[in-house]
Amino acid sequence: MSRMTIAVPASTANIGPGFDSAGMAVNRYLTLHVEESTQWEIEHRSVHLPSVPPVTDHLVYQAALHTANAYNKTLTPCKITMESEIPLARGLGSSASAIIAGIEVANQLCSLSLTKADKLKLATEMEGHPDNVAAALYGGFIVSVLLPNGEIEILQKTDVPLDLVVYIPTFELKTEDARKVLPEQFSRNEAAAASAVSNVMIAALSAGDFTLAGKMMEADLFHEPYRATLIPNYEQIRQEAKLAGAYGTVISGAGPTMISFAPKGEGHKIESKLKTTFPSYEVQLLSMDDVGIHVSYISEKEKTSK
């Protein structure tokens, strides 16, 4: 088997009112180097990755096994060396990236020739909703829906001329904890009002009216008012980013990372100002990844020549 490298982007989801449906791939990556072996072995090489659990408990292996089982295939053993730029439990889609990577491992090892739609279905079965996994798989800005009959529909947009600035705190926030603060249900009037905000935001992003899109991002009624209490400096970050020129600032995924959407070319100014204002945060300028998962190979001949 040739040595294989799989790179999967991080992702931000929800983007304000696009709850469990809107996602965007960003240019931080989970990278797997995969090579033939006599037994399964997974090695972590990143400060963003925890101690390696038993292989059978590893999310990448579980996603690979889920995929192989779905097609009645047997996984051949391999060694996986993982590097990551994606912090865990920070709202940047670390689990989604791992799931997409694991599905691709099985796709390659078992010669499944899966389509992206096939991979998205498998990933959504594991993740529960398609927003992060769709963005990590396809790249770009993705709006997705899991229909009651199990079908998944997506709309992808790659021409989104925005700078992205993230504010990553030192603490983690598990998605299940962030979901516990949300209401179990909304009244019809509440749901209609929240959906209207989301509709206008998506329409504004599609039309390139980023000022209106930013306003709607910050008007979410589905989750941000409830999760804001879990995130220190929530209002201060939004206010300072707005003063520095951001269109809008929202919780990334379930948090605690926050992300600003800014005019192209203006992100450096926002990054610089907020680094000074919030020195305990990792403040970084990012961009949208419009490719999604990428697979490359090194043949045995190439490995020997190196």
Image (cartoon, grey):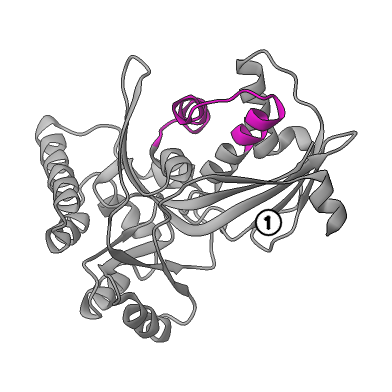
> Residue 155's quadrant in the figure?
top left
- Image coordinates of residue 48 in percent, x first then y, are 64, 60
- Image coordinates of residue 192 in percent, x first then y, are 11, 36
Where is the C terminus found, in terms of image quarters?
A: bottom right
Q: Is residue 163 left or right of residue 48?
A: left
The residue sitting at 45% across, 72% down in the picture is 284
In this picture, is 294 found above or below 268? above
The magenta stretch spans residue 104: yes
The magenta stretch spans residue 63: no
Q: Residue furthest right?
A: 38
Q: Is residue 269 left or right of residue 136?
A: left
Where is the N terminus found, in terms of image quarters?
A: top right
Q: Main secondary structure of the magenta part?
A: helix
Few, some or many C-alpha atoms within 10 Å of disc 1 (few <14, some 14-19, many ≥20)? some
The residue sitting at 47% across, 74% down in the picture is 281
> Residue 258's quadrant in the figure?
bottom left
- Taking depth in this image into account, of 141 and 148 the one nearest to the observer is 141
Magenta-highlighted residues: 102-130
Which residue is tagged 1? 83
- Image coordinates of residue 291 in percent, x first then y, are 45, 49
Q: Secondary structure at mark 1?
A: strand
Counting the numbered discs, the total is 1
Q: Is residue 305 left or right of residue 185?
A: right
Give the residue type that dot 1 points to.
Answer: Glu
- Image coordinates of residue 245 in percent, x first then y, are 22, 77
Q: Is residue 105 left or right of residue 174?
A: right
- Taking depth in this image into account, of 72 and 274 the one nearest to the observer is 72
In this picture, is 29 found above or below 293? below
